[in-house]
Image (tube, rainbow, N blue to C red):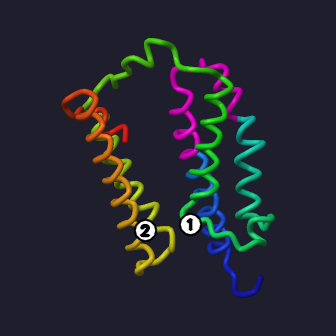
Amino acid sequence: MEGLTHYSINSESQELSRWYIKTFCMWISDETGSLLGRMNIKDWMMFVPLWLTFSYTVGAFSLWGGGILFQWDVIDYTVGFVIYLSSRIAGLTAAYWVGPRSKADREMFPPNNILLMLAGAGVLWMGWAGLNGGGPSTANINSSMAILNRNICATTSLLVWTLLDVIFFKKPFVIGEFKA
């Protein structure tokens, strides 16, 4: 322990803890969207600890904790595997087993406040820039390419959704564009 101060150990532990907490919070928001209108809050509150125990923890350990994916040299660039892939698979699986949304939610499900939705989408956009650009932990070409790729993908998704709104509903909707 010579050469290491109490502050450096504490700072490193705190940063690692913040990283795991942020990734878990991102997973909850992704997962909640797939179960919205399908599951009541009590069932969802039972589902989250089960998923945390049997899926998130296993995925996080296998990649970040020296598990099998770590040993295979799998690179998880900005939590793509542990959060995005596992939460999407969990959402698809849970939606299949829980069943379809209620009829009212399938027909029209507008937000309560469109201005807050737009503000939230802007904050999310900037947060993703920080997450993707901060993945390499340094300002270099990799972080620049991550931000560029994220912007290209998000913009393509927005344009496709807008085009589909125009094709099917004869006009674009701002709610539909920000769902993309």
Q: Is residue 24 left or right of residue 109?
A: right
- Dot 1: few (<14), some (14–19), or many (≥20) neighbours within 10 Å? few
> Residue 77 — which label?
1
Determine which residue is flagged by label 2: 146
Q: How many marks?
A: 2
Q: Amino acid at mark 2?
A: Ala
Cβ–Cβ under 8 Å for marks 1 and 2: yes
Kindly identify the amino acid type of the residue bearing the numbered disc 1: Tyr
Q: Secondary structure at mark 1?
A: helix
Q: Residue furthest left?
A: 171
Considering every residue shown, the one lying at the far bottom of the view is 3
Residue 150: horizontal and vertical position, in percent? 39, 60
Gap between marks 1 and 2 measured at Cα: 9 Å
Query: Magenta includes 44?
Result: yes
For the point 70% across and 87% down, which residue is it? 3
Q: Position of residue 125 (x, y in %)?
A: 35, 52
Q: Quadrant of the C terminus?
A: top left
Residue at screen point 53% across, 40% down: 30
Q: Residue at x 66, y 27 (%)?
A: 45
Residue drawn at (76%, 64%) of the image: 65
Work out whether 171 lies above or below 58: above
In this view, the residue in front, 146 or 93, is 93
Q: Secondary structure at mark 2?
A: helix
Judging depth in this view, the residue of 168 and 137 nearest the camera is: 168
Side of 50 relative to 171 (left or right): right
Task: Give the x, y percent position of residue 84.
Answer: 56, 51
Q: Quadrant of residue 77?
A: bottom right
> Where residue 117 sits: x, y (%)?
31, 34
